[in-house]
Image (cartoon, rainbow, N blue to C red):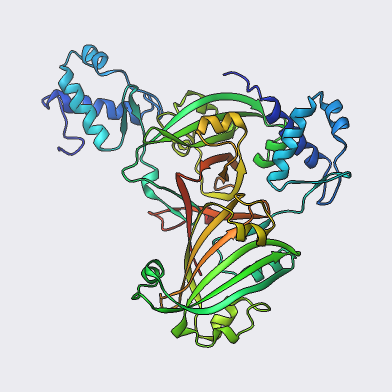
Amino acid sequence: MEAHKPRPRELAGELLEAYILEHRLQPGDKLPSERELCQRWSLNRSTLRSAMAAMERDGILHARPNSGTYLAPPKFVRNLQDLHSLSWTAADQQRVLTSSLLSVGRMECDKTLAKHFGQMLGYPVYKVVRLRSVDSEPLMVETAFIPAERAEGLQEADLEGRSLFAVLEEYGMTPERGEESIGITYATAEEAALLAVDEEAPLFWLVTRTYDQTGALMEYCRTAARPDRVRLTSVLHRWDAETGGPDDEA
Amino acid sequence: MKPEGTVGPNSPLYLQLRELLRNKIENGEYPPGTAIPPAGELAQTYGIHRLSVRSAISALIGEGLLRSVQGKGIFVVGEKLEQNLESMGGFEQNMQARQVKIETRVLSKTWRPAGVVYGEVLKCAPEEPVYYIRQISLLNGEPVSLEEVYVPEALAPGLKDIDLNVFTLYEACEFCGIQTVRGEQSLDITILDPMDARLLNVDPKLGVLAFRCVNYDANDRVVNYTRTYTRGDKSTFSVNYRR
């Protein structure tokens, strides 16, 4: 079998990652200058630059004009398997989550929404639009739809200081299970302005359905999230159908 | 079909050949992941008609012990492991097309030292040899994802002989005695370098979904690491969860 011959940019990216690991760089730590790194690794300047630009886009590095390149703060990790609210997850990662309420109001379901809720055209729902930020950096725009008949008066609730799930719990809705689909979207002018990205920048597009203890859809939510600040994770377990339990419990 | 064991010297030749092939698969003469001799060769070896060979083979394909791959031959699947397994949690990839035909092509299968970066991921020393495989998945003939696979050689020395155009990585690892029980997965969006963007036939300025998975066996060893770049216009991922 042949030995792998990395392409120059691939090699530069791996050298940078190895440098970060070997020197145990922490978020906010500065990398040596481009010139020094090029000399150290005998790399072409443009190759190193393109590798660094890719890592900056991926949210690993952060360049400050006239200052240098730094290790970026870690991405906000959202595990899709737990039903914890974003507020809980942020606290768990020792980050400060803030929500600003962009709008809340009652509306009638259009064809698509009515279908999701299994209701007729015009079924009343609350639409709650919030901008979620972590450590003062905009992270995602969330648009949630909640059946109005089950949450009368929702517009009066504190939707900035509390998690939406905590509020809905008081209305007797407890999240029991959910489904999320993940794709790519490109920022509209409005999303770009809210999230401080360029128009047409790629964003995560998440559609979440959360069902309560009765099996009813309690929330239908669409989220546009910055991929340089958010990582989605999950753990896959393979179960042995014959023994009926997860293999790793053996 | 007659139950196994009742096949004897007076049984039809295709049944005798079927049992012969089954034995050779079970005793390891035809190991999982390899091709069996071509039908013409089997017909000649045993002096039987090609049609009898075909019947024997199609019976074993029906049982899931063999797999036929057009233009490549008949391959041994061995024990049907994956059918007993049910996946729980984790991302599922959904193709945005009906009647999909997915085909995987290996672009390169090479060797490299783990290095600092992959040594950290695979929990092995930087000098450890690692297989590095690049493959592309085609959906109805159109490229949809590019996958990079890292497997420590020491865990799966037999991997170099298994055709990954025919078997999935999961199957190939099973053939090497590796049982994956858990995978830690993550999803990001990234931009491909121009060469990889061309391979996937995407505009290099557009984002792709970067799916990464670290797979573990029952002893919590990292058995492989995969990174898959998927076109956002061709597929989405989904995940189900419950309290």
Q: Which quadrant of the figure has residue A231? A: bottom right
Q: Residue at point 48% right, 23% down?
A: B161
Q: Nearer the viewer, residue B75 or B70?
A: B70
Q: Residue at point 48% right, 32% down?
A: B136
Rendered location of residue A117, percent (x, y): 39, 72
Q: Which quadrant of the figure has residue B114? A: top right
Rendered location of residue B21, percent (x, y): 28, 26
Residue farthest front in this picture: A189
- Number of numbered labels in the structure image: 0
Q: Is residue A163 left or right of residue B8?
A: right
Q: Is residue A10 left or right of residue B233?
A: right
Q: Residue at point 61% right, 40% down?
A: B191
Q: Is residue B221 visible?
A: no
Q: Is residue B49 visible?
A: yes
The N terminus of chain A: image quadrant: top right
Rendered location of residue A22, percent (x, y): 81, 39
Q: Nearer the viewer, residue B243 or B143?
A: B143
Please say if B176 is above or below B88.
above
Please say if A191 is above or below A201.
below
Q: Is residue A137 left or right of residue B225?
A: right
Q: Residue at point 50% right, 53% down?
A: A237
Rendered location of residue A41, percent (x, y): 81, 26
